[in-house]
Image (spheres, helix red, strand yellow):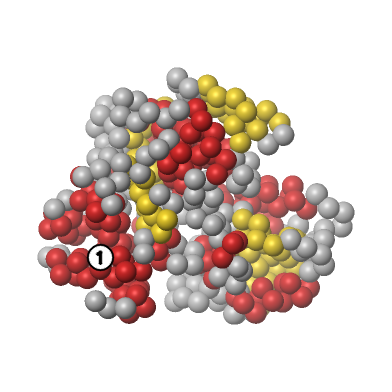
C-alpha cells in the first residue's frame, strides 16, 4: 500500500482533469463497488453559501441524539481528511490509502475520474464500511450534475442561491437556482433558506413537477432574536426557545434554522431527536475557517468568503467588531481565485479598510496580487502586494497594534494555508 503522502500526491494529481459535470462516471464507479451509498440513509445539503455550516450543525445534532453520523464536506482547509468524518473524527491516513487503492483497482469505464468524483466515492464507501446510521452530505458545486447527486436522501436543503461558479452554473440567478434544484427528488421533502424571490420561484416550480413538499424560511419556519446571544425557532411542528450557537456571525442563526427545519421535516418516524440533542448539538458545533477567531491582541479572523454574497455577510461582521474597540483599525489580507468577482467582492470593504494586503494562495487557479490590484478602482489607499501568504500574514501582524483587527479572506484555500500557521487547537473538528 502506498504511503499517505504518495496517496495524496495521486489524489491531488486528479485535479488535472478539472471539473466534469455529470453523473455517469460516479454512478458506474459506485455500481462496481456495490452501491455503498445505498446502504445508509442520507441528508443532502446544497446552496451557494451556508451549506457547510448547516451540514456541520445537522451532523452535530444527530450525534448528540446518539446516532453514528458520517459527514462529507468540501473543500478542506488544512488536511484532506477533514472532508470525510465519522462521529466528528477524520478518516485515518491508513484508511485514505486503503480506499484509494480499492477505488483504483475497481477502475473507471468512463475515462479518468476527477478528484471530486473519487473522493465522493471514497466517502460513501467509508461511511458504508463504518456502518453509519446516517450520512450528512454537502453538495460540491451546483447540484444537478454534482457527483453527490446519486443519492436518494431523506431530505434536501438548499440554503441560499447567489452568484458563484457562473462558468458552470449559468450567469443568472434563475439558471443557478435551476442547477441547485437538481438535487430535489420525488417524494423527498425539501427546505429552502432565505434567497431571492426569483430563485425560490424556480426551485418551487421544479419541486411542483416532482411533487416535492417544500418548507421555506420566512414562510414556514423562522427564528427570533431573544438577546444575549440566544434565539428561538418556530417551525411546522417544533418550537424552541433560548437556543444558542457559538459560531460567529448573525447569518449562522439562519443556518441553524435551516438545519433544524431539515431535521424537522426529514427525520420523523426514523430518527428520534430530543430537545436536549438540539441544544447540545448547536452549542458544540464547530466549523473552522468561517468567521473563526484564531488569535487576539490583535484580533485575527479567518473567513472563507469568496463571492459577493458572502462578502456582504463578512462586512456586517467586521463592522460590528470594529465598533467593539476605540480607534480599532482593519487590516485585510485577501487572496482569491482567478474566476471570482474581484471588484464586487472587494468593494464593500473599501471605506472600512485601513490597510489592504493582496496575496496569492499557492495554486494554479489563484489570481496574482497584481491581478487583484486591477480591481481596486476608487480605492484611496494603495495595497501592499505580497505573494506568499505567510509573509503577508507576518506583515499584517507587524503593522497591527494590539487593539486592531486582521481579517484573512477571499478564498478557503488561502484561509486553509493561514490556518496551518496557527496551533491545532485553533482548528477543531465537529465534535460532541
The picture places residue 416, in percent across and down from the top left corner, at: 53, 66
| Residue 225 image offset from top left, x and y in percent | 66, 30
427, 214: nearer the viewer: 427
Q: Nearer the viewer, residue 156 or 170?
A: 156
Which one is nearer the viewer's eye here, 240 or 394?
Answer: 240
* Above/below status of 44 relative to 90: above
| Number of dots carrying numbers | 1
Task: Tell which residue pokes out farthest to the right in this image.
Answer: 326
The quadrant where residue 181 appears: top left
Q: In the image, what residue occupies the spot 49% across and 67% down? A: 78
Task: Give the residue at x 20% y 51%.
Answer: 36
Q: Label 1: how many residues lie within 10 Å, few (<14), some (14-19) or many (20+)?
A: some
Q: Is residue 17 left or right of residue 217?
A: left
The location of residue 321, given as percent across then percent down, is 75, 51
Task: Please state if 99 lies on the left or on the right of 403 as rendered.
Answer: left
Q: Residue at x 45, y 30 (%)?
A: 261
Specify the quadrant that holds the N terminus: bottom left
Q: In this orientation, which residue lies closer to the viewer: 395 or 343?
A: 395
- Eyeballing the image, is 283 above or below 111? above
- Outermost residue toward the front? 66
Does 178 appear above or below 401?
above
Quick check: can you spot residue 368? yes
Residue at image location 26% in from the left, 47% down from the top: 131
Q: Could you say whether the residue bearing mark 1 is in a helix, strand or loop?
A: helix
In this figure, which residue is indicated by the disc labeled 1? Answer: 99
| Residue 384 in sight here | no
Q: Could you say where residue 271 lies in the image, as x and y percent from the top left?
A: 34, 31
Amino acid at each position: 500500500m502506498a504511503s499517505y503522502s504518495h496517496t495524496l500526491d495521486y489524489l491531488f494529481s486528479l485535479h488535472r482533469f478539472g471539473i466534469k459535470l455529470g453523473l455517469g462516471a460516479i454512478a458506474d464507479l459506485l455500481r462496481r463497488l456495490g452501491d455503498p451509498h445505498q446502504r445508509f440513509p442520507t441528508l443532502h445539503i446544497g446552496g451557494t453559501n451556508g451549506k457547510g455550516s448547516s451540514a456541520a450543525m445537522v451532523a452535530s445534532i444527530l450525534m448528540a441524539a446518539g446516532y453514528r453520523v458520517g459527514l462529507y464536506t468540501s473543500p478542506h482547509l488544512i488536511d484532506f481528511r477533514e472532508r470525510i468524518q465519522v462521529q466528528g473524527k477524520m478518516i485515518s491516513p491508513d484508511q485514505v490509502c486503503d480506499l484509494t487503492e480499492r477505488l483504483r483497482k475497481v477502475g473507471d469505464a468512463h475515462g479518468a475520474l476527477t478528484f471530486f468524483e473519487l473522493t465522493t466515492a471514497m466517502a460513501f464507501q467509508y461511511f458504508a464500511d463504518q456502518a453509519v446510521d446516517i450520512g450528512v452530505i454537502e453538495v460540491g458545486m451546483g447540484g444537478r450534475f454534482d457527483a453527490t447527486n446519486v443519492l436518494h436522501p431523506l431530505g434536501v436543503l438548499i440554503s441560499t442561491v447567489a452568484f458563484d461558479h457562473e462558468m458552470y452554473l449559468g450567469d443568472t440567478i434563475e439558471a443557478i437556482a435551476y442547477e441547485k434544484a437538481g438535487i430535489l427528488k420525488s417524494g423527498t421533502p425539501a427546505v429552502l433558506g432565505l434567497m431571492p424571490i426569483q430563485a425560490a420561484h424556480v426551485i418551487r416550480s421544479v419541486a411542483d413537477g416532482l411533487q416535492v413538499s417544500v418548507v421555506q424560511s420566512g414562510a414556514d419556519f423562522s427564528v427570533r432574536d431573544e438577546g444575549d446571544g440566544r434565539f428561538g425557532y418556530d417551525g411546522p411542528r417544533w418550537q424552541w426557545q433560548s437556543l444558542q450557537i457559538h459560531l460567529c456571525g448573525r447569518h449562522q442563526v439562519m443556518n441553524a434554522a435551516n438545519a433544524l427545519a431539515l431535521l424537522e421535516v426529514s427525520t420523523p418516524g426514523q430518527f428520534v431527536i430530543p430537545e436536549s440533542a438540539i441544544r447540545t448539538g448547536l452549542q458544540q458545533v464547530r466549523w473552522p475557517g468561517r468567521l473563526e477567531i484564531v488569535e487576539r491582541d490583535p484580533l485575527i479572523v479567518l473567513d472563507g468568503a469568496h463571492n459577493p454574497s458572502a462578502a456582504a455577510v463578512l462586512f456586517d461582521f467586521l463592522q460590528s467588531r470594529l465598533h467593539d474597540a476605540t480607534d480599532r483599525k482593519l487590516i485585510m489580507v485577501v487572496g482569491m481565485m482567478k474566476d471570482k468577482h474581484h471588484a464586487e467582492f472587494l468593494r464593500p470593504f473599501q471605506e472600512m479598510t485601513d490597510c489592504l494586503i493582496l496575496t496569492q494562495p499557492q495554486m494554479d487557479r489563484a489570481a496574482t496580487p497584481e491581478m487583484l490590484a486591477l480591481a481596486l478602482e476608487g480605492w484611496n489607499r494603495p495595497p501592499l502586494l505580497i505573494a506568499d501568504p505567510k509573509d503577508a500574514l507576518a506583515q499584517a501582524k507587524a503593522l497591527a497594534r494590539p487593539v486592531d483587527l486582521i481579517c484573512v479572506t477571499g478564498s478557503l484555500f488561502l484561509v486553509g494555508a493561514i490556518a496551518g500557521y496557527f496551533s491545532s487547537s485553533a482548528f477543531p473538528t465537529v465534535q460532541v
